Image (spheres, rainbow, N blue to C red):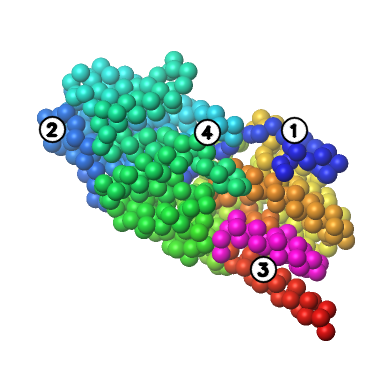
Amino acid sequence: MTLRQLPLSLLPAAMLMSAQQPKPPEDLCVAPPSAAAPSLPARLLPGQGRVHMPITTKSPEAQAFFNQGVAQMHSFWSYEAERSFLQAAKLDPESPMPYWGIAMVAAGDYRPMFQLLDDSGQRRPSRGRASGGLDRARQAAGKARELASRGDRREQLYVAAVAARRDPSAKDPEGGYIRALREILRAYPQEVEAQSYLALALMKGYTPPDKTPRPGSEEAVKLLREILGREPDHVGAHHYVIHGLEGSRHARDAWESSRRYPELAPEIPHALHMPGHIYVQTGRFADAAAAFEAAARKERELMAADQLYSKGHHGHNVHFLANAYCFVGNYAAAMAGSAELLGIRENPREARQATNTRTAYRQGWFARLRTLVHFRKWDEILEGSALPDYPGPRERAWRHWARGLALAARGRTPQAQAELAAMSDQAKAWRKVAGSDSPQLRTALLELEGHAALSAGRAARGLHLLERAADLELHLRYNEPPAYPRPVLEALGLAALQRGEFPRAETAFRRALDQNPDSPGAQEGLTAARARSTKILAGAGN
């Protein structure tokens, strides 16, 4: 049951606000598009993945840079891919395909379709619109069309596909793009590049919490498996298999691609990072941490070598790393990860972006919140300095949530209720800034009221509210790392265990393990609940 289905009598007063769905945050598993085209010259780099996509050109060097651009595009490294395509265009300005490449990547939307859609399934505005990347992509598409007659029929079909996606007058540019990719495959059934682009465009993910595939997702995975059957070292197909299965009930099927992808592109941070998505979802938390650590080392190298290198992906990666450390029980490492990101101060432009929750600093702030709450560091939270007071309504709302949890855990019920009221005020302030409510904050308000009720000795009411909050969390939009700081089901299970409701605790921990397989906290809780239930049953039988 979702929040909209709950009777008003079951909602706390603090929750009685608009249920309008917000525009979901942009995924920062890839860096945002750049405000300006990258500078030249480009260099041929090692470890980018091997791709050969023949184009019409008299310049072997242009072909080499074009191949590199396609390989970098397959790892969503749009900035470097655009640089490689620009270099190819400079070496052979009469070839249409380098401009095709720029049109594919400059807008920053060469990603799985589920990352581009809002909660209603509608296409969100391109991230490149404000930065100028979309304009560059459209201009490049126009240039590719001007030169298309210089290429062969296959290249002309590729140009037509990207031109359809970049057509500002099109009512359904994504649909036009998909239809044009299918046209390529009708003419050239073995064209693995078009097949991989089509798979990415069809990939709409899975519905929470049952993880049912949305239309197109199963076809996408089938296409990728066909590619790997013919080209087992196709760097893009391995990458896209990971995206195609993350959030599904079959994430383990991506283990082989998770092993192979970083081997094929060892110099690209995103290639080192992506296996962690699958490992977290399949209970391999130590392997996830190792993947994120490798990506962080590579990214630090790149940031040290280039002061213009985007820090957004690094923030996402280290945030996810802190999340993995929480699951493996490494408090010190999780705190160190958040501290690194908190040390990356926001520039004035970032600080003015009230709704940009994905700066490296704000990722670090949320990683710190996640860590303190996961390990139930109530004294540190109440002391205040461990979680900085960031001057934004979203962060202040979450800070009140953390303090409310700590006060409830310490039995200070009136103060916990005061934090709940303050959190509600900040959630309303966030709505004014963002234009819509946050489903995560709505869930957190409900959870906090549950803990406040438990603190007041109202166990039935408190556990009931936690169950409602857990249901809301399970229905949140898929995001990695999870957009909610901790699994509510584990908190529910612990609360039920502490109050002697062992069957209820066992049910909660079982559901928590379905949400996060092999979670140590859920496993320990389930073991304790079973042991207490067994002891009671044994006592009743004597």
SS under mark 1: loop
Residue 408 x, y percent position in the rendering: 80, 59
Residue position marked by numbered label 1 in the rendering: 18
Mark with earlier residue (3, 1) = 1
SS under mark 3: helix
Between the residue at mark 4 and the residue at mark 3, the CA separation in whole angstroms equals 37 Å
Report the front residue among 295 and 198: 198
Which residue is the extreme one toward the left? 58
Which of label 2 and label 3 is nearer to you? 3
Residue 487 x, y percent position in the rendering: 65, 56
Q: Quadrant of residue 351?
A: top right
Q: Is residue 345 magenta?
A: no
Which residue is the extreme one toward the bottom? 542
Q: At 25% from the left edge and 17% from the top edge, which residue is drawn? A: 146
Mark with earlier residue (4, 3) = 4
Residue position marked by numbered label 3 in the rendering: 526
Residue position marked by numbered label 2 in the rendering: 59
SS under mark 2: loop
Residue position marked by numbered label 4 in the rendering: 117
Please, is residue 333 above or below residue 441 in the view? below
Q: In the rendered image, is residue 493 in sight?
A: yes
Tell me whether circle 2 and circle 4 mark residues in contact (CB < 8 Å): no
Inspect the image, locate mark 4, and give the three-letter code of the amino acid beneath it. Leu
